[in-house]
Amino acid sequence: MPQKPPSLDAQQLGAYFALMDVASLLRHAVEQQLKDAGDLSYVQFQLLARLGDSPNGSQRMTELADGVVYSRSGLTYQADLLEKAGLVTRAPSPEDERGTTVTLTDAGRARLAAVFPGHIELVQQLLLAPLSGDDDDDGVRALAELLGPVREHMRTAPPRSAARRRRSSS
Amino acid sequence: MPQKPPSLDAQQLGAYFALMDVASLLRHAVEQQLKDAGDLSYVQFQLLARLGDSPNGSQRMTELADGVVYSRSGLTYQADLLEKAGLVTRAPSPEDERGTTVTLTDAGRARLAAVFPGHIELVQQLLLAPLSGDDDDDGVRALAELLGPVREHMRTAPPRSAARRRRSSS
DNA sequence: TATTGTTATACTCTATAACTATA
DNA sequence: TATAGTTATAGAGTATAACAATA
């Protein structure tokens, strides 16, 4: 197959680095806010938020892991912390006894509620406001439409460099 | 001043989470590639790349810290690692004896060169290709134009939650 | 006295591999 | 045998505060 051009033009590099920089700065600010307002990390916030979106406030570990955390043990670690803090509950899943069902507690909902307004305000200030600029050529919509497909692509097309470690080959 | 609306609409939240997710997935993949191809973390790669862009391959610690790392000690830590690996050199700055000048070595340039092609290819695959989609309504340019100003805004407008810790007030 | 950078230290997070229990 | 989750453990990274040296 044809060799890919081994370099990017300035605009491509610019887009890449702009994305990484913005995300990095935003993440840093957001971690700060979440920690100050509710002693949560961003990952923990994501987990709680996902549970909060679930109809009954419950989800299986595996479901939770998808898209939030990269290793199972990492999720167990975070779930431990959240459980110790009284924000979630863990119990064996009814249908599949191997599974664990994580459930948001009232305290968990309260924590989420405590943190959310400030969180939103920060995101508004840091990201959304400058995105739309002075005119109203809705940059927010543009960004969402640009990045949505990219997210899908990334979730379905794992990089070849991250060699599959499933299915023991011996 | 008027109270800001305490919630975001679905599109705003969508843009925010899409950005965080894409950046998170991309970062994860990129860390993997850099580690496999050249035993570098993304932060280390950024530091080397910045030095590589400098005319003489040198920069002051403080300059390097801007935009790459969030604490001075963090930079010292990374600079230690890079120096031990022979990729950079540290020496007292000529003009200001308090300062340290970090310089890219030949090995550092070589490492950068070793890592770059694969890096670019990965970014191309994961981010740039899906950004532009099938049609050529250059999404890359759009993303760069959207995010460039946001980056500037974030760099100049620190969130109020991250209270200034400079200038001792006592 | 303010600034540059380093050190000591503690902490958080992530990943790998081995392990248990259920399907 | 395969899958869900946990545990043990190790390693990388980050931040805070105290410190030394120079401006």
Image (cartoon, coloured by chain):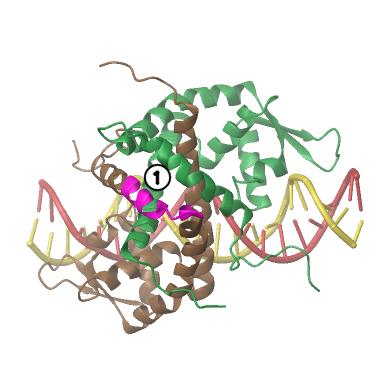
Chain colours: A green, B brown, C red, D yellow
- When the figure is inspected, residue A142 is found, relative to residue D7, above or below; the finding is above
Q: Secondary structure at mark 1?
A: helix
- The reply to whether residue A86 is visible in this rendering is no
Residue at (33, 32) in percent of width and height: A125
The quarter of the picture where the N terminus of chain A appears is bottom right
In this rendering, is residue A30 above or below A11? Answer: above
Residue A166 is left or right of residue B51, and the answer is right
- The picture places residue B72, in percent across and down from the top left corner, at 30, 56
Which residue is the site of mark 1? A28
**At 18% from the left edge and 36% from the top edge, which residue is drawn?**
B169
Q: How crowded is the residue under tag 1: few (<14 C-alpha within 10 Å), some, or many (20+)?
A: some
Where residue A135 sits in the image (x, y, percent)?
26, 32
Q: Is residue A124 magenta?
A: no
Q: Which sits in the foreground, B116 or B1?
A: B116
Range of the magenta residues?
B131-147
Name of the residue lying farthest toward the bottom: B106
Q: Quadrant of the C terminus of chain A?
A: bottom right
Q: Answer left or right for B75 relative to A99.
A: left
Seen from this angle, which residue lies furthest top?
B2
**Which chain is home to disc 1?**
A
Give the answer, above or below, for where A165 lies relative to A49.
Answer: below
Q: Nearer the viewer, residue A9 or A37?
A: A9
> Is residue A128 among the parts visible in the rendering?
yes
Look at label 1 and name its amino acid: His
**Residue B57: x %, y % from top left:** 24, 75
